[in-house]
Image: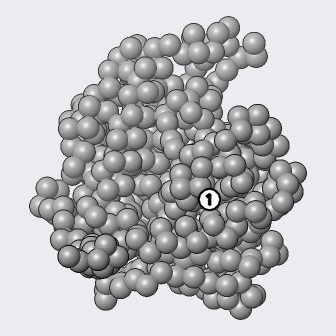
Amino acid sequence: MIPAAKVQRTAATVVSSWPYAPAPESKDIVKIADRYGLFIGGKFVEPLSKQHYTTIDPAREEPLSEIAQAGKADVAKAVRAAREAYTGRWSKLRPSERAKYLFRIARILQERAREFAVLESRNGGKPIRESRDVDVPLAAAHFFYYAGWADKLEYAFPNRKPRPIGVAGQIIPWNFPLLMLAWKIAPALAAGNTVVLKPAETTPLTALLFCDVLRQAELPPGVVNIITGDGRTGAELVSNAGVDKIAFTGSTEVGKAIARTLAGTGKRLTLELGGKAANIVFDDAPLDQAVEGIVNGIYFNQGHVCCAGSRLFVQESIYEAVISKLKGRMSTLRVGDPLDKNTDVGAINSKAQLEKITSLVASGVEEGAEIYQPPCKLPERGYWFVPTVFTNVAQSYRIAQEEIFGPVLSVLTFRTPDEAVEKANNTPYGLSAGVWTEKGSRILAMAQKLRAGVVWANTYNRFDPASPFGGYKESGFGREGGLHGLEPYLALEEA
Ligand code: ADP
């Protein structure tokens, strides 16, 4: 007979050596053109600037396509197309007709979900599991949700005579390219505005595929125009006099520059900027669930998330237990090919972002924090960063103050709820926070005291089109999602 202890050891050895078989999603589902123009007035046109740049797959450092760099004249052309569509047709359309287009877009996004998921993962580096299960379904859900409001605005804002405001200029970042497009376009159209949208320079491809969805949905020409290019194109859009409203999601630095440009112009502005969220774990929290929430909070989308739970606050009495569970869980994260369905952490979006993460992590080590990275074999090509946790972090360290926008967590501790609030609020940002506790009254008390636009309780990074999202302080102003998300796109009379 084999002694029991020996059986267990043998089983453990066998289990730990089980490798995953590769499970890559096929790339063939989506066709990428060699070169794209600008989508203006319902069709692709060559950029007047005659300039293109190359967009790549950050996991392979391979070129994917040539993308137009829109110049001043291109931006002006797109804004004119949006204006013509607004005055000529869209603003006169019955609201229930607007709703029909939004429903159609939502349905087509669902039908073509796999194409969008693969393209999003190829161009941005995010795991297919996330683009397939989060980005694309949520993008469709936003269009469904706002389609429902399009003909109910009078009920949503009673006695306030809601009217559209005109042409919306929208600038989005590279972390959730299709989802941010949906957050921007769906409420703008539902409210009766037309749009010029600029995706981020590193991730234009799903926005360009979305133009084909608009064609399929037979959206009238010029209602949505997509112009590509880098920050210079964004700056042109901001300063174009034909734009009535700017909606921007991106860095706090660029957000401040946009606010300066628009000051005194009378143009509307909403800004959704950076964050340095506190994820707070109390000693009565269900620890295994909390550890999942910590991991989801910071390693989801490689930490390229403005509301990422990048500062973990653990109550002192459970510190050792949480850190040991967290390190154990981190060692199971699979980093690698974004198109592999087993991958948890994909590629860093760009070389520049990898350099930024690397330099902030180096500052953490230099300032005296203790770094932990699980053993992890990274692919040879592409931009990668091992999931990282810092302990022994002081509030003054750069890794506790600055947004890293990468898979890097800083752990701090607290003794009392008041201390947790004080430390959590000790940041220039105020986008989101998480609270882990079994006590309902504590959740409510914390949510009231935390200066953050979104407070998650016993969960993290959970999004819903019906739920408003946005920040305080240097995280920006204005809300997206829910009824609140319609307001910035409407002229409303005082009640
Ligand atoms: P990140 O640092 O996350 O790349 P950015 O704020 O630089 O964020 O970029 C977010 C979006 O803003 C992108 O679409 C980018 O091209 C655009 N952008 C960058 N600079 C400017 C600017 N000066 N004016 C308007 N848009 C800009």
Counting from the top left corner in percent of width and height, residue 348 is at 43, 73
Counting from the top left corner in percent of width and height, residue 470 is at 64, 44
- In the image, farthest residue toward the front: 1
In this picture, residue 445 sits left or right of residue 437: right
Point out the image quarter for the N terminus: bottom left
Instruction: Using the image, determine if residue 406 lies above or below residue 166.
Output: below
Instruction: Using the image, determine if residue 495 lies above or below residue 398.
Output: above
Is any atom of residue 438 visible in this view? yes
Instruction: Using the image, determine if residue 366 lies above or below residue 329.
Output: below
Callout 1 crowding tier (Cα within 10 Å): few <14, some 14–19, many ≥20: many
In this picture, residue 413 sits left or right of residue 376: right
In this picture, residue 33 sits left or right of residue 244: left
Counting from the top left corner in percent of width and height, residue 358 is at 56, 84
In terms of depth relative to the viewer, which is nearer, 464 or 214?
A: 464
- In the image, farthest residue toward the left: 28
Q: Hey, which quadrant is residue 314 in on the image? A: bottom right
Secondary structure under tag 1 reads: loop
* Residue positioned 32% across, 21% down in the render: 100
Q: Hey, which quadrant is residue 321 in on the image? A: bottom right
In this picture, residue 20 sits left or right of residue 494: left
Residue kind at label 1, given as amino acid type = Gly
Counting from the top left corner in percent of width and height, residue 374 is at 47, 81
